[in-house]
Amino acid sequence: MNKPLLGCIADDFTGATDLANNLVRSGMRTVQTIGVPTDLEAPIDADAIVVALKSRTIAPADAVAQSLAALRWLQGQGVQQIYFKYCSTFDSTAQGNIGPVTEALLDALHCKKRGPGHGPEHDNSEGFTIACPAFPENQRTVFKGHLFVGDVLLSDSGMRDHPLTPMRDANLVRVMQAQTRRKVGLVAHDVVARGADAIRARFAALQADGVGVAMVDAISNADLMAIGQALADMKLVTAGSGIALGLPQNWQRNGRLQTSSSGNTQADALPPATGHRAIVSGSCSVATNAQVRDFKQGGGLAFAVNPLALAAGTDVVSNALAWAQTKLNDGPVLIYATAEPAAVLAVQAQLGAARAGEIVEQALSKIALGLVTLGVRQLLVAGGETSGAVVQALGIQRMTIGAQIDPGVPWTGVLSPACPGAHLHMALKSGNFGSTDFFSKAFTVLKASA
């Protein structure tokens, strides 16, 4: 059994499956763990391992601690390169968590140990890495250091009203610089367009100028492939999931990865789907709001979760499950707390943003657990924070990556104590991802892939 080549640390669960999906597409056998495994010795037979954390919006110190624990475990697995994965919309605040985690990982990776009896020996630099959230297939591009969502700047997109990480500055060099003591520079698109050698030369020039983090432009998959080639010897890569398309070629070139760049046709095989179908949606993104509307307008069965009713003590969880029990045979059913920005702000004004998010997450995770107990075996979850809460409630430890529904969103196969002896199919959708008809299309894809 060969040691894994790539070790990945993802800051939320939907982002982890997004990354794992792209690695599988590029020919890497990939295993995703939920949290840091407790067995530090057990080897994993895979080309890549993705450790899914729920660290995007927690306190920076806690995010750093969890990420370093994941790093130590991945190093124990013998991986050659570390990949810190964050959202393609660079979700963060002025305090982090992208910058603090990047710094901590760089510090840890650029500290070499001497033999017994000797102290740590640092290499001659403080470390160097890139930042690149670009994922052109999902209309996330970086140009002149500015992040675009489709045809508009990040700051003009729906992300400006995100309830936890509102993104009101599209200049990622500036955003990243606010989060790190290291100097942040730029690899502009005119360099990227000249290929891997030009990118490496720009890396060297930036390092000579004292830069520790280089924001890298990318507007196409060709750019991702060129950047990926230039990253072959970099200890730490930080990026969205798009860069994952460009890394496997390095191991294919040196013979360490035997699958082709077109992907392994068996890599996404899952058992046939059975049981009831359900959707649990907590995201309030523009994309998910459109998906909820489309599902309902198409005659889909839907139950709205009211955060104010939850706060008032109404047993919304029991009410939702009682409703679902009468509808599951006619499903899929949708249970959602998704709402437009004005409604979200009104709730936050009464409850506070943190409390509103917490009570909705808790309720939706209990509802998801109840749905599985009622026989749901095909479960789609929308929203990163919601997905994390649901996966933890279901006691899931590992995920096998299956067929892609839309770029960045695959079906996965999991085992859960909530349905012992049965296979559960799950799709964890980032709030911003997916076509308008995603909710209905997802189940069609799953049926077709069986």
Image: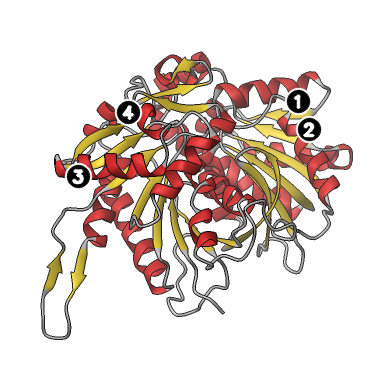
Quarter of the figure with residue 319:
top right
Q: Which residue is mark 4?
A: 172
How far apart marks 3 and 1 lie (CA) works out to 50 Å
Residue at (47%, 60%) from the top-left corner? 35
Q: Amino acid at mark 3?
A: Gln
Q: Amino acid at mark 1?
A: Phe
Q: Nearest to the eye among marks 1 and 4: give it.
A: 4
Q: Earlier in the sequence, mark 4 or mark 3?
A: 4
Q: Earlier in the sequence, mark 1 or mark 4?
A: 4
| Position of residue 228 in the picture relative to residue 283 (left or right) | left
Q: Nearest to the eye among marks 4 and 2: give it.
A: 4
How far apart marks 1 and 4 lie (CA) works out to 35 Å
Q: Which residue is mark 1?
A: 295
Callout 3–callout 1 Cβ contact below 8 Å:
no
| Position of residue 183 in the picture relative to residue 265 (left or right) | left
Q: Which residue is mark 3?
A: 207
Whether 67 is drawn above or below 422: the answer is above
Whether 241 is drawn above or below 433: the answer is below
**Residue 439 in picture, x, y percent from top left:** 73, 33
How far apart marks 4 and 2 lie (CA) works out to 35 Å
Q: Which residue is mark 2?
A: 440
Secondary structure under the numbered disc 4 in the rendered image: helix
